[in-house]
Image (cartoon, coloured by chain):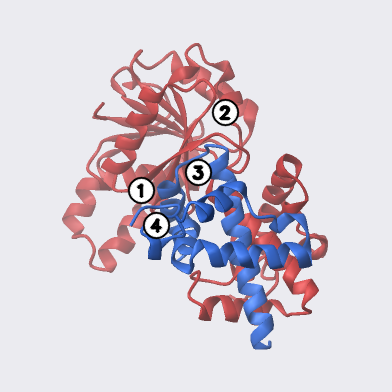
Amino acid sequence: MYVFKAAVLGAGTMGAEIAQVISLSGLPVVLKDVDEGQLGRGMAHIREIYGRRVQRGRLTEHDAEDRLALVQPQLDYKGFSDVDLVIEAVPEKLALKQAVLGEVEAQVSMTALLATNTSALPVTEIGQSLARPQRLVGMHFFFPASVMKLVEVIAGERTDEEYIDSAIEFVESIRRVGVRVRECPGFLVNRILMAGLAEVLRAERDLSLEPREIDAVVAASKLAPMGPYALADALGLDIAQDVAQTLQAAYGERFDLGDRIANLIAQGKRGAKTGEGFYTYTG
Amino acid sequence: MTKDQETELLDRFNLAVFLEAVRCLDENVSTAREIDIAMRAGAGLSEGPLGRADKVGLDKVLARLEELEARWGDRFHPPERLRALVASGRTGVAAGRGFLEY
């Protein structure tokens, strides 16, 4: 299946970034939101990403204008009948995602592929509001999507293999790396990475180490681009804690982060975004 | 940090990641190749956990897991899939086959 026209629902940061990536590959994409202000902020964000690419010499100003023109902002479902792929990227609330997908299903053709961008919610449940849940796939874009190369393509219990194939083809056509993932809590990358982070926190305690020296050793080993504490701060400690709690409920004690991160959160230290987490951030 | 502490820290991180990757494989969440691709492209790891274990040598990985299991308990229990690979001589890159083929 070739996608001639895509649509992204939700013009928050994630939706805007996804629309930017699609337009950069030369495909027309509708960016839809219910809120005019949000739509404006989403388009401004896309312009900003293109601006940076021009500044860095990755794209000429002329090409950037052309690609930007491929993004069509709108508040309604005009022209959705010839959309081949819809990526829902509204906030991570199950009922909201169900409602939005149920609504768009009535606007697109029978052959259109539906995708939900989620890092944590079960695709099978998101699809419960659909008349044809077999055409819903999960597409987990990593943050920030304009930079990160990976997209986990998630099959829910009712997803047809055919739609997974189409989703993988699409992800590759926008120059991203698509991997097939069968639905499970945490999906693939967050689940595996969080198992490592939880063990590092236990090692910190067992060996009486400091976060700073652990990060230095991990960075020096070249295993990962940054140490686990710097990564947790960048991600947001509250988000890391949420993910770990979901994983712990699903898989057990190996995902227990102890009280280290909970204590920081209780002091209002939620990582880089609050100026303090394991480290202190200025400016 | 002493050299021993550094070794223990990195082994525990690497093996916790490796064990979770093997669980994903056992649960058919994804394939060995795609797990390694995902961990490089999505988590920025320099090597995928399964290819990394193949490079170290699965016999060595198994021996280290047995040590860590004795010291830290069940969470380092070596997976059956790993024992089977080692028993069949598929010990990784050096043998030409492990979790991946070479």
Looking at marks 3 and 4 on the same chain, the residue that comes earlier in the sequence is marked by 3
Image coordinates of residue B31 in percent, x first then y, are 45, 43
| Chain at tag 1 | A
Same-chain check, marks 4 and 1:
yes
Label 3 belongs to which residue?
A: A12
Q: CA distance from mark 2 to mark 1?
A: 25 Å
How far apart are labels 1 and 3 at the CA level?
23 Å
**Point 54% across, 39% down: residue:** A118
Circles 4, 2 touching at the beta carbon (< 8 Å): no
Q: Earlier in the sequence, mark 4 or mark 2?
A: 2
Q: Are marks 2 and 1 on the same chain?
A: yes
Can you identify the residue that label 1 sits on? A177
Query: Mark 2 or mark 1, which is nearer to you?
Result: 1
Q: What residue is shown with label 2?
A: A97
Q: Nearer the viewer, mark 1 or mark 3?
A: 1
Left or right of A139: which side holds A49?
left
For mark 3, name the chain: A
Picture disc at residue A147:
4
Tags 2 and 3 on a common chain: yes
Residue B78: image tag: none
Residue flagged by tag 2: what amino acid is it? Lys
> How far apart, in angstroms, are the residues tagged by discs 4 and 1?
12 Å
- Chain A colour is red
Q: Residue at x 60, y 38 (%)?
A: A92
| Residue at position x 53%, y 35% in the image | A90
Task: Determine whether B56 is above or below A86 in the image.
Answer: below
Label located before the other in sequence (1 or 3): 3
In this view, A151 is above or below A155: below
B102 or A137, nearer to the observer: B102
Secondary structure of residue under mark 1:
strand
Residue A115 placement: quadrant = top left
Residue A156 x/y as whole percent: 53, 27
